[in-house]
Image (cartoon, grey):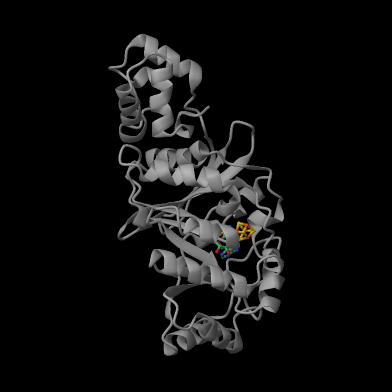
Amino acid sequence: MLIYDISYDDLKKFMVDNNQKPFRAEQVWQFVYKKKVDSFQDMSNLPSDLIELLENAFSFKALDLVVKHQSQDGTLKCLYGLHDGHLIETVLMKHHYGNSVCVTTQVGCNIGCSFCASGILKKKRDLTAGEIIAQIVQTEKLLGERINYIVVMGIGEPFDNYKNLMQFLQTVNHPKGLAIGARHITVSTSGLVPKIKEFAHMGLQVNLAISLHAPDNDTRSRLMKINDRFHVEEVVEAIKYYLAETKRRVTIEYILIDNVNDTLEHAQRLAVLLRGMNVYVNLIPYNSVLEVDYKRSTIESQMQFYDHLKKNKIQVTLRKEQGHDINAACGQLRSQHL
Ligand code: SAH
Ligand code: SF4
């Protein structure tokens, strides 16, 4: 088991079960998440029998850096190999307000969106909580600066790996763990309705983003196979439930694809659909994917869409590109190396 895979409470229990003092758990987490050491041997003030015990039970080695690409705007894209040879991506973005990391949650994805490089390959397996945490720890070491924000928007559908996602969130947010504030963490989902409702009760103030991408079932089903299971109306109803339960604002992600979901009529329908809801729409110009025919919306269509939402008092931003020159869209670097 990876050392990043065990929760604080379970580590305490592990200590007790092995005739160690429970406070050793706190010391070990100090080394793992504050000092960020690479081995148990580096845990300088621990007794040698405890180091041996830990070495026999846990490992540190989670990810091998296979390739890294740096783009001109400072975005760093890392391709990591897992212990069983699978490849995943982690993207680091530098903003004026801090550094954020975009993490992968699954090897591939089963949701099968027609525009997405990650979905072209079926899911091979879920990542463990520790493998998601390790992406942050390792990328932080690579950068040599602290990571302040986490976006769960890499390869995979986080709500299809719910249990591990929850443990990941607990550990990165834990004051004795990475201590990244819940408000600095965003989870993006393709809209698994029951999980959106469950997430409303998870008890952490983590931000939720929903990949809507279309205001009607015809368009959405064309883009996202999952829409046949959870229709637009059900997704919107789940968002309303989440808003009522948490009193938090939800982000609606909407990629703009030329002539598919970016017409004035789409914008009009979206404005009606979201009227009165405490949401903000993040418009993302589509990044072309080698294997797919879709094209990015023209600047005129992007502006027309943005202006219509704005005029109708929907909070909206049009995303400024990051890492376009190194294929920033999720899964693209990985698909080039398979
Ligand atoms: N599976 C989750 C999270 C990972 S995808 C989800 O779908 O929400 C994160 C975001 O990247 C989603 O909004 C997704 O639609 C978007 N995305 C995927 N491929 C893209 C591409 N080629 N260009 C722009 N955005 C893309
Ligand atoms: Fe999976 Fe998200 Fe890509 Fe859809 S957009 S295939 S849900 S990773």
Residue 84, quarter of the rendered image: top right
Q: Quadrant of the C terminus?
A: top right
Q: How far across and down, in percent of the image, does residue 254 sit?
A: 54, 72
The quarter of the rendering in which ligand 1 is drawn is bottom right
**Residue found at the very far top of the displayed protein:** 49
Check the image and report above or below for 128 versus 321: above
Residue displayed at 58% across by 59% down: 194
Q: Nearer the viewer, residue 37 or 5?
A: 5
Residue displayed at 66% across by 73% down: 220
Residue 255, quarter of the rendered image: bottom right
Check the image and report above or below for 130 versus 71: above
**Can residue 268 be seen in this snapshot?**
yes
Q: How far across and down, in percent of the image, does residue 293 sit?
A: 71, 69
Q: Is residue 244 left or right of residue 113?
A: left
Q: How far across and down, in percent of the image, does residue 296 sit?
A: 60, 73
Q: How many marks?
A: 0
Residue 141, quarter of the rendered image: top left
Q: Is residue 37 left or right of residue 197?
A: left
**Can residue 300 be seen in this snapshot?**
no
Residue displayed at 59% across by 81% down: 262
Q: How far across and down, in percent of the image, does residue 97 sit?
A: 30, 59
Q: Nearer the viewer, residue 294 or 280?
A: 280
Residue displayed at 60% across by 46% down: 106
